[in-house]
Image: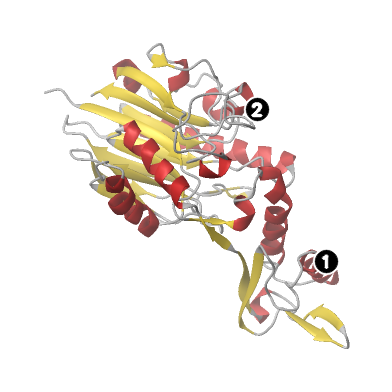
């Protein structure tokens, strides 16, 4: 009995809602806002609020009009459930609590509804992929993914998936990794690695979601779906170190799985290039994982990258295959028509429904492989 499966990975950049700061004309426009949000979130987690921490909180909040006075700026809001974080005393704003356990609250990124045409183009990409197993990166939550599957795919004459699963990860922005499968590829079990730690603390920015799928061949297919730490904002040395820790942990998980399973795949957005130092623990050091874009059955379009314009430095998305999956792979490819290429969108073909960058399904192309199990 022949068991044929198409496996794809696609960074959808959210289904229905996206933080306003991540939905601006360019990534650079939102970088400072996301860094401020990240810094505020980290600062308020401190057990003790020193004078320096309090001043830093006030300084960052003061850079966002309305955040101290009304607890709401254009991009960030402050939620206070019990006690106040900031009050105005004698004409000046001050941080009131002495530490994290003295108040209950948090900062949130305000969200914006994604344009309908962009949502439809995301559905177009997924329908064109015709995947049996789809690894989804940057979905808001399981309910959003489920609604998208049930409403948007059929709207554009696509077939909904039979199984949808997503477990919330560690990112406050609601950009998680999930999976969608069609029969006979049933999700047998799932292991979340959100709590994996090393000597430096929590490892995964989102999750390394481990899915075990039955295939009908008597052998399980195991997929590790990832979204590594971005280069987008913050200290790049710290970001590189985080991605390296993530790459090492994924390799350790893969090595353990490979002892018991022949068919293992690592997929998703690793946010770095194959020759980078952060990805060396996963792709270097004698790793037997095969990148689909280096497979002899891969049919590309002449562009080495997967993000934005498809340049070499934009090779961020991966399907990495164990040797057995590599042997069984009959074809591989890239779906780039959901991306707006270049300033005028004329670097490569895109769907005719995409009239501007705002209409694009994503900044990421999708990857796929056909495997004869």
In the rendered image, the quadrant that contains the C terminus is: top left
Q: Residue at x 34, y 43 (%)?
A: 211
Nearest the camera: 160 or 226? 160
In the rendered image, the quadrant that contains the N terminus is: top left
Characterize the local packing of mark 2: few (<14), some (14-19) or many (20 or more) Cα atoms within 10 angstroms.
some
Q: Is residue 172 above or below residue 125?
A: below
Q: Residue at x 40, y 45 (%)?
A: 120
How has the structure been colored for display? secondary structure
Nearest the camera: 326 or 152? 152
Characterize the local packing of mark 1: few (<14), some (14-19) or many (20 or more) Cα atoms within 10 angstroms.
few
Q: Nearer the viewer, mark 2 or mark 1?
A: 1
For residue 42, which quarter of the picture?
A: bottom right
Q: Is residue 37 above or below residue 12?
A: below
Q: Give coordinates of residue 221: x percent, y percent.
A: 29, 33
Counting residues from the start of the chain, the first of labels 2 and 1 encountered is 1
Q: Is residue 248 above or below residue 332?
A: below
Q: Residue at x 80, y 64 (%)?
A: 63
Residue under label 1, please give it.
59
- Mark 1, secondary structure of its residue: helix
Q: Is residue 304 visible?
A: yes
Q: Disc 2 and disc 1: Cα gap in Å?
A: 35 Å
- Mark 2, secondary structure of its residue: loop
Q: Give coordinates of residue 24: x percent, y percent.
A: 64, 50
Q: Name the side, left or right, on which 341 lies relative to 299.
A: right
Q: Name the side, left or right, on which 251 lies relative to 149.
A: right
Q: Is residue 259 visible?
A: no
Residue under label 2, please give it.
277
Q: Give coordinates of residue 242: x percent, y percent.
A: 63, 42
Q: Residue at x 54, y 37 (%)?
A: 363
Q: Name the side, left or right, on which 158 lies relative to 101.
A: left
């Amino acid at each position: 009995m022949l068991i044929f499966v198409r496996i794809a990975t696609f960074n959808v950049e959210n289904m229905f809602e996206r933080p306003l700061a991540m939905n601006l004309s360019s990534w650079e426009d939102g970088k400072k806002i996301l860094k401020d949000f990240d810094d505020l979130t980290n600062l308020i987690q401190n057990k003790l609020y020193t004078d320096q921490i309090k001043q830093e909180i006030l300084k960052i909040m003061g850079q966002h009009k309305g955040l101290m006075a009304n607890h709401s700026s254009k991009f960030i809001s402050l939620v206070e459930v019990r006690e106040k974080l900031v009050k105005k005393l004698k004409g000046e704003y001050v941080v009131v609590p002495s530490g994290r356990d003295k108040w209950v609250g948090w900062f949130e990124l305000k969200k914006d509804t994604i344009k309908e045409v962009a949502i439809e183009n995301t559905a177009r990409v997924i329908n064109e992929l015709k995947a049996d197993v789809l690894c989804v990166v940057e979905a808001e939550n399981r309910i959003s993914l489920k609604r998208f599957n049930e409403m948007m795919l059929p709207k554009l004459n696509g077939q909904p998936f039979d199984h949808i699963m997503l477990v919330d990860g560690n990112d406050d922005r609601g950009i998680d990794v999930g999976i969608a499968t069609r029969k006979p590829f049933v999700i047998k079990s799932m292991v979340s690695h959100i709590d994996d730690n090393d000597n430096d603390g929590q490892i995964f920015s989102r999750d390394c979601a481990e899915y075990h799928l039955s295939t009908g061949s008597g052998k399980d297919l195991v997929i590790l779906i990832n979204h590594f730490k971005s280069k987008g904002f913050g200290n790049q040395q710290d970001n590189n170190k985080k991605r390296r820790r993530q790459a090492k942990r994924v390799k350790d998980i893969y090595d353990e799985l490979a002892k018991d399973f022949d068919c293992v795949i690592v997929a998703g957005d690793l946010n770095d290039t194959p020759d980078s130092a952060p990805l060396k623990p996963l792709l270097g050091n004698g790793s037997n994982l095969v990148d689909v874009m280096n497979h002899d059955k891969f049919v590309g379009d002449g562009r080495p990258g997967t993000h934005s314009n498809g340049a070499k430095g934009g090779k961020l998305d991966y399907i990495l295959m164990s040797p057995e999956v590599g042997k069984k792979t009959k074809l591989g490819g890239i779906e780039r028509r959901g991306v707006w290429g270049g300033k005028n969108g004329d670097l490569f073909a895109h769907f005719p429904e995409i009239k501007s960058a705002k209409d694009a399904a994503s900044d990421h192309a999708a990857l796929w492989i056909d495997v004869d199990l």
